[in-house]
């Protein structure tokens, strides 16, 4: 995955985490606190060495600064990356030690779930610090699984982007969805309800077949879904779906999906622009999850989350329109808007 050359890169502040007895080995990276505490999840993953974990943390923390600023949240960007111990390990000990490290930062960093961590892990973290979200939800208040909010944000973004690109509603539009897990699956249900036609693919064949049967969707091969006969391509699996090769062969005229870090190489963004394929930038579109997490941390209601998630549609349309008017890649327009928001005063979240 690439960091775009035009992005500003302040020096990264970081704290190395090491507690052998607890199996803790990792890093907390703080990219920006200009808008508020650095917020971003805690990833538990297997890395070949400490350097690889650190590089991932830096890249992810930077991404969180852009995503949080763009969603107009009162948070900067940070991320924790922990190296998964080999074999069996004591999750309670590891996440309690991690929670103690978060507490030592005294609120400069707020953690939550990410790849490889769960609500139960965040409850262990919460026994050592209050600077944690992604815990069990209380009725009426924000919290719990962020995926439905992420799916709603992507859906709203897609509605607005389809209106911009094809001047139509979603009814009758064919959307190719790569990855039908928590977010992709929920997105497909919303799209089916709105009358869109679906082409889906997932490496989990049973999951894909079940959803296809439920929604009457067609299925595509894993390596063919990005080139499917569809108006819209929605990457909802892992990062890096958009590369020089995949964009060159793409039939869709719009890309809008949930996956993080969709631009997989430096050719993807210019090629999308050259081929007239509108690209709704990933971190603008998939902010529903962090909106829910941030609201949980601030003690806000699900109503406030919904209002903020519904703004993702008009925000996506504004970025696509400005990019088209100025002949720029939407990813570049979005980054500049986010950088302005990182510098400017922070309004109370609406
Ligand atoms: P998930 O693990 O529930 O679903 C991912 C799905 O993609 C799985 O069904 C998996 O089998 C499938 N998959 C993996 N590789 C594939 C491939 N090459 N081709 C087709 N399918 C493949 O994850 P999720 O929570 O739905 O997240 C999906 C994406 O959205 C990720 O990139 C994630 O970082 C991003 N995202 C998620 C959230 C959230 O709230 N969960 C928020 C922001 C961004």
Image: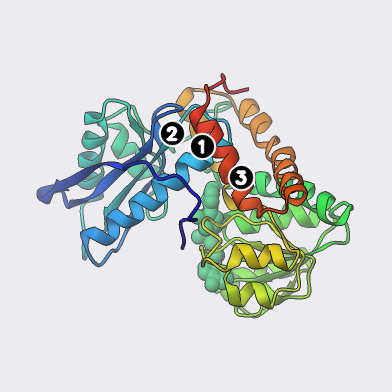
Q: How far apart are marks 1 and 3 (CA)?
A: 12 Å
Q: Does residue 132 appear in this view?
A: yes
Q: Quadrant of residue 275?
A: bottom right
Which numbered disc, 1 or 3, marks the residue that appears first in the sequence?
1
Which numbered disc, 1 or 2, marks the residue that appears first in the sequence?
1
Residue 334 marker: 3
Q: Distance between the residues labelled 1 and 2?
A: 6 Å
Mark 2, other Cα within 10 Å: few <14 / some 14–19 / many ≥20 = many
**Going 17% across and 52% down the picture, which residue do you hit?**
23
From the image, tell me which residue sits under label 2.
76
Q: Does residue 179 appear in this view?
A: no
Vertical side of 107 occupied by 80: above or below: below
Q: Is mark 1 on a helix, strand or loop?
A: helix
Which residue, as the protein is rendered here, is positioned at the far left? Answer: 21
Are the two marked residues, 1 and 2, in contact with CB atoms closer than 8 angstroms? yes
Residue 68 marker: 1
Q: Is mark 2 on a helix, strand or loop?
A: strand
């Amino acid at each position: 995955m690439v960091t775009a050359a035009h992005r500003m890169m302040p020096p990264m502040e970081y704290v190395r985490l090491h507690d052998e007895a607890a199996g803790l080995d990792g890093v907390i990276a703080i990219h920006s606190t200009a808008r508020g505490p650095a917020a971003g999840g805690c990833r538990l993953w297997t890395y070949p060495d400490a350097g690889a974990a650190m590089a991932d943390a830096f890249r992810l923390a930077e991404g969180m600064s852009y995503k949080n600023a763009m969603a107009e949240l009162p948070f900067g960007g940070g991320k924790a990356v922990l190296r998964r111990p080999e074999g069996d390990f004591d999750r309670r000990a590891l996440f309690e030690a991690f929670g103690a490290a978060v507490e030592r930062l005294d609120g400069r960093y707020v953690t939550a779930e990410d790849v490889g961590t769960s609500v139960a892990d965040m409850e262990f973290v919460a026994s050592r610090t209050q600077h944690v979200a992604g815990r069990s939800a209380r009725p009426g208040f924000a919290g719990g699984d962020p995926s439905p909010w992420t799916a709603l944000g992507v859906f709203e973004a897609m509605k607005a982007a389809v209106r911009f690109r094809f001047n139509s509603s979603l009814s009758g539009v064919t959307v190719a969805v790569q990855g039908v897990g928590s977010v992709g699956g929920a997105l497909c249900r919303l799209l089916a309800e709105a009358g869109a036609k679906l082409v889906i693919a997932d490496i989990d064949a049973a999951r894909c077949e079940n959803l296809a049967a439920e929604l009457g969707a067609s299925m595509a091969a894993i390596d063919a879904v990005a080139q499917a006969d569809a108006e819209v391509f929605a990457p909802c699996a892992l990062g890096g779906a958009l590369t020089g090769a995949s964009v060159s062969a793409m039939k869709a005229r719009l890309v809008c999906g949930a996956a993080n870090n969709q631009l997989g190489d430096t050719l993807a963004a210019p090629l999308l622009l050259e081929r007239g394929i509108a690209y709704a930038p990933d971190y603008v579109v998939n902010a529903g999850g962090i909106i829910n997490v941030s609201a949980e941390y601030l003690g806000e209601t699900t109503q406030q989350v919904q209002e903020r998630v519904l703004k993702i549609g008009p925000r996506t349309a504004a970025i696509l329109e400005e990019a088209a008017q100025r002949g720029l890649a939407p990813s570049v327009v979005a980054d500049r808007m986010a950088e302005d928001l990182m510098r400017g005063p922070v309004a109370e979240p609406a």
